[in-house]
């Protein structure tokens, strides 16, 4: 139990975070109500501290220091961070310093897709958005407080609102970058109707990003994210709700960065749905990457997979916290979770916290975690055939990460991730 002083400190920090961000103006009554409820959730929970159960491996101080909104970026050419996935056919929607930049974006209009700025849908009575904005974030607080996500609901004004009603031919690329100091908040809303399908690519970082994804029965969404050496602390949240027979896949590759906290909260709300969550971490120097996942099975015959691989060098640290929560109604659940790490140096560190909480009696659930060095036998085998040490290490690391990369359905996107792993290993010299 936290002391009264710590609880008061958490609340004061939450109040300071809210005070540093201006209240949105010109929004509809329903949006203002959603923001008011989020403010209450944040103040009730308080800002996260190291003593909180799901923050004990990661110091959130850098994420809870009040900061003014980041200044608008000057007009100019395409920042390199926005060029990620440039070799893949996708429609880019660019955000710089937490603001959408049409001059750096493509024409995203396609059959089966309606897209609008977040502020536009919050200013009107858009039915699908009204039932989504803040709703999944609030539901995600049931078992674990997520105050940084509540802060985003309370204050974020920029982002994309996507309404998918059919099979969208070309992927969408949500590209984020930040120039200068400050706190950039982004909020994306995605509703995929029955029969709809879309691939979302995401790259770059903002200080605090939330994506709420609502999949109707039979809907399909694939989400592939690349976080390439983010320079400043960042927190991301993906909330996904799956209807009957829906399919959701998300993969994140995080390479280096000072502090990155990624949370994925997935709920099965309909029978016979599939949700796969995968990720790879490449860390060196003093990088710190925390992947925290919470999967709720609330329907029958649903399948979840969590596959995470970490490769750590120098004094890098990685954390995986993954939970499978099975409600009593969720019979025939199939839940799988694995987190594995390879340490390339004696100073690297990996912490894992796998969890199962099961109230149904007809389920198949498993979890596991391993940590170790590269296989010496494998290295010897490759080097005995004339392969230099560094190249042999790169080959073994590529093979190790492949189980997570294989969760990506598109072969071209798998190749992009494999190439990034190879480049990262090649930079070791």
Image (cartoon, rainbow, N blue to C red):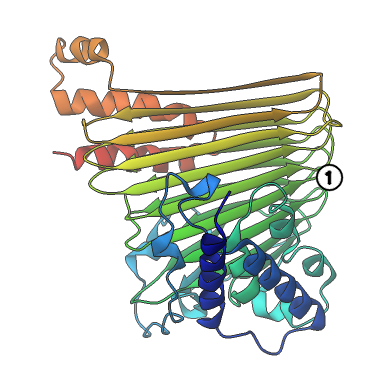
Q: Position of residue 282 (x, y in %)?
A: 34, 41
Q: Is residue 280 above or below residue 98?
A: above
User: Would residue 267 appear left or right of 259 to someone viewing this image?
Assistant: right
* Labels in figure, total: 1
Q: Which residue is mark 1?
A: 217
Query: On screen, 192 above or below 8?
Result: above
Q: Secondary structure at mark 1?
A: loop
Could you tell me if residue 206 is visible in this image?
no
Residue closer to the observer: 66 or 237: 66
Q: Is residue 146 left or right of residue 420?
A: right
Q: Position of residue 291 (x, y in %)?
A: 49, 44
Q: Residue at x 48, y 58 (%)?
A: 235
Q: Residue at x 67, y 39 (%)?
A: 295
Q: Position of residue 311 (x, y in %)?
A: 33, 34
Rendered residue at 63%/54% (across/down): 145
Please tell me whether residue 332 is drawn above or below residue 41 in the rendered image.
above
């Amino acid at each position: 139990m936290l002391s009264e002083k710590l609880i008061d400190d958490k609340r004061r920090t939450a109040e300071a975070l809210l005070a540093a961000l201006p209240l949105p103006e010109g929004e509809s009554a329903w949006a203002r109500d959603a923001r008011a409820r989020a403010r209450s959730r944040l103040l009730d929970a308080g800002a996260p501290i190291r003593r909180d159960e799901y923050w004990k491996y990661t110091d959130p101080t850098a994420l809870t220091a009040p900061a003014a909104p980041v200044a608008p970026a000057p007009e100019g050419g395409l920042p390199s961070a926005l060029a990620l996935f440039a070799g893949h056919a996708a429609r880019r929607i660019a955000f710089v310093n937490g603001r959408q930049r049409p001059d750096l974006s493509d024409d995203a209009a396609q059959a089966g897709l309606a897209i609008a700025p977040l502020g536009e849908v919050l200013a009107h009575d858009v039915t699908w958005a009204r039932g989504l904005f803040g709703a999944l974030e609030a539901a995600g607080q049931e078992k674990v407080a997520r105050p940084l996500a509540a802060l985003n609901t309370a204050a974020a004004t920029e982002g994309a609102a996507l309404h998918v009603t059919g099979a969208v031919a070309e992927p969408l690329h949500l590209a984020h970058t930040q120039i200068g100091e400050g706190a950039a908040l982004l909020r994306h809303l995605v509703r995929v109707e029955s029969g709809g399908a879309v691939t979302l690519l995401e790259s770059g970082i903002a200080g605090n990003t939330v994506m709420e994804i609502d999949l109707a029965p039979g809907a399909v969404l694939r989400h592939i994210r690349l976080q390439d050496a983010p320079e400043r602390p960042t927190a991301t949240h993906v909330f996904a709700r799956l209807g009957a027979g829906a399919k959701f896949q998300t993969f994140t590759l995080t390479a280096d960065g000072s502090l990155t906290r990624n949370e994925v909260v997935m709920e099965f709300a309909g029978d016979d749905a599939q949700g796969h969550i995968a990720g790879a971490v490449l860390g060196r120097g003093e990088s710190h990457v925390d992947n925290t996942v919470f999967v709720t099975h609330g329907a029958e015959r649903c399948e979840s997979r969590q596959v995470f691989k970490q490769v750590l060098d120098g004094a890098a640290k990685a954390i995986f916290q993954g939970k499978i929560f099975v409600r009593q109604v969720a019979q025939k659940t199939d839940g799988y979770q694995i987190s594995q790490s390879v340490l390339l140096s004696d100073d690297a560190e990996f912490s894992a916290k796998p969890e199962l909480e099961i109230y149904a009696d007809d389920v198949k659930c498993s979890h596991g975690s391993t940590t170790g060095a590269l296989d010496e036998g494998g290295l010897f085998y490759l080097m005995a055939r004339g392969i230099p040490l560094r190249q042999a290490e790169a080959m073994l690391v590529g093979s190790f990460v492949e189980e997570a990369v294989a969760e990506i359905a598109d072969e071209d996107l798998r190749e992009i991730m494999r190439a990034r792993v190879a480049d990262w290993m090649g930079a070791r010299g």
